[in-house]
């Protein structure tokens, strides 16, 4: 009977721990049933469990999302005064952008902040809010976190505020090198704020764009030729074989040449193989940010990409949907960082 069902303190702790670990309520309930020998021995139903979690969320939001978030930040400062956060408000006094660091992030940046990567991968998907994380490598070449941000949008103004806040939090110390993707607004903001840093582009993202723009190279032209002349199969096979080497040629331009003249010759030869050169022309203008021969004097610790953040971001992905609960995300982020630090 419903009146006889009650969730004990131990069961409540297990239910909340399962949710915090990302286990769905139905799966958590089935596991709990198995542990006690069946649902009749458990003492509560799956609906009781969902009601308990709903009540817990309502308690967490007692002050509204913004108020609960501020309470969370203030509690973190009481735990450790080195915890810092900054908020940006829009014209209607609503919180738009959020940045925070804990004591370890500040200390790690002081020791290992020479090379930084910054990525807002989730901003490319409308289902997710733009989440940015500043990362680097420690003395053991382990990924370390220097700060995190939740953004309202990915405009130049938002990035300017974020980068200024990041530097202010870390006593104005600029990294020697910072890597990002090829986002134009982000690049413009970095040029304004990180005036003492070398700005490199993530080679992983560049190669993804190369695959998109250079392969296949002449598909439309080939279709036209097939309609005009079915007898040129051998010629087209030779062209396909030639095109298969374009990505290899581009990769060699990115990683293989230390001499600028050799790079220039190889890049020019590659361009002659491409009919539509729009993307190649645009990426060539940024060659100082990705070609090895232009980076010989750059201090980078072997880092050429923002992929340091990939596995960390994956662990947060399901908590960044557009209807997400901000406080629950912050709590999950905190637990993820703790697990990351002990790995």
Image: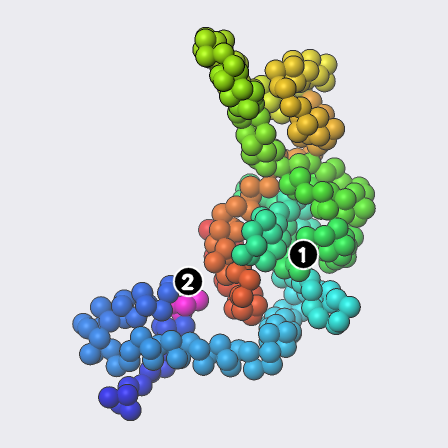
Q: The N terminus lies in which quarter of the figure? A: bottom left
Looking at marks 2 and 1 on the same chain, the residue that comes earlier in the sequence is marked by 2
* Cβ–Cβ under 8 Å for marks 2 and 1: no
Viewer-closest of 302 and 308: 308
Where is residue 116? Give x, y as percent. Answer: 66, 44
Mark 1 lies on a secondary structure that is loop
Answer whether residue 266 is visible to the viewer in this image. no
Provide the residue designation for mark 2.
22
Counting from the top left corner in percent of width and height, residue 180 is at 66, 42
Instruction: State how far apart marks 2 and 1 are (Cα).
Output: 27 Å
**Residue 231 in the image: above or below residue 178:** above
| Residue 19 colored in magenta in the image | yes
Point out the stretch of residues depicted in magenta: 17-22
Mark 1 lies on residue: 153
Relative to 146, 32 lies left or right: left
Q: Nearer the viewer, mark 2 or mark 1?
A: 1
Residue 268 in magenta stretch: no
């Amino acid at each position: 009977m419903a009146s006889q069902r009650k969730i004990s303190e131990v069961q409540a702790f297990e239910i909340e721990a399962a949710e915090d670990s990302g286990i769905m309520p139905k799966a958590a309930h089935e596991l709990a049933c198995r542990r006690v020998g069946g649902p009749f021995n458990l003492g509560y139903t799956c609906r009781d469990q969902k009601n308990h979690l709903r009540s817990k969320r309502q308690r967490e939001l007692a002050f509204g999302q913004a108020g609960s978030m501020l309470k969370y930040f203030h509690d973190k400062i009481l735990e450790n005064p080195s915890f810092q956060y900054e908020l940006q408000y829009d014209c209607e006094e609503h919180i738009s952008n959020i940045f925070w660091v804990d004591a370890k992030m500040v200390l790690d940046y002081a020791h290992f902040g020479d090379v930084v990567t910054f990525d807002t991968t989730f901003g490319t998907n409308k289902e997710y809010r733009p989440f940015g994380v500043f990362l680097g490598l420690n003395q053991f070449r382990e990924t370390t976190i220097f700060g995190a941000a939740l953004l309202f949008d990915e405009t130049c103004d938002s990035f300017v505020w974020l980068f200024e806040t990041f530097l202010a939090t870390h006593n104005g110390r600029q990294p020697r090198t910072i890597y990002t993707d090829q986002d134009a607004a982000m690049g413009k903001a970095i040029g304004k704020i990180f005036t003492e840093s070398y700005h490199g582009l993530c080679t992983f993202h560049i190669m993804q764009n190369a695959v998109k723009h250079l392969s296949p190279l002449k598909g439309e032209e080939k279709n036209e030729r097939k309609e005009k002349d079915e007898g040129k199969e051998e010629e087209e096979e030779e062209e396909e074989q030639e095109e298969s080497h374009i990505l290899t040629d581009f990769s060699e331009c990115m990683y293989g040449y230390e001499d600028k003249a050799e790079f220039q010759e190889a890049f020019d030869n590659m361009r002659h193989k491409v009919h539509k050169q729009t993307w190649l022309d645009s990426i060539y203008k940024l060659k100082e940010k990705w070609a090895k021969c232009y980076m010989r004097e750059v201090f980078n610790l072997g880092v050429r990409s923002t992929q340091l953040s990939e596995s960390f971001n994956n662990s947060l992905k399901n908590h960044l949907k557009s209807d997400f609960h901000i406080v629950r995300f912050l709590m999950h982020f905190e637990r993820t960082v703790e697990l990351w630090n002990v790995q």
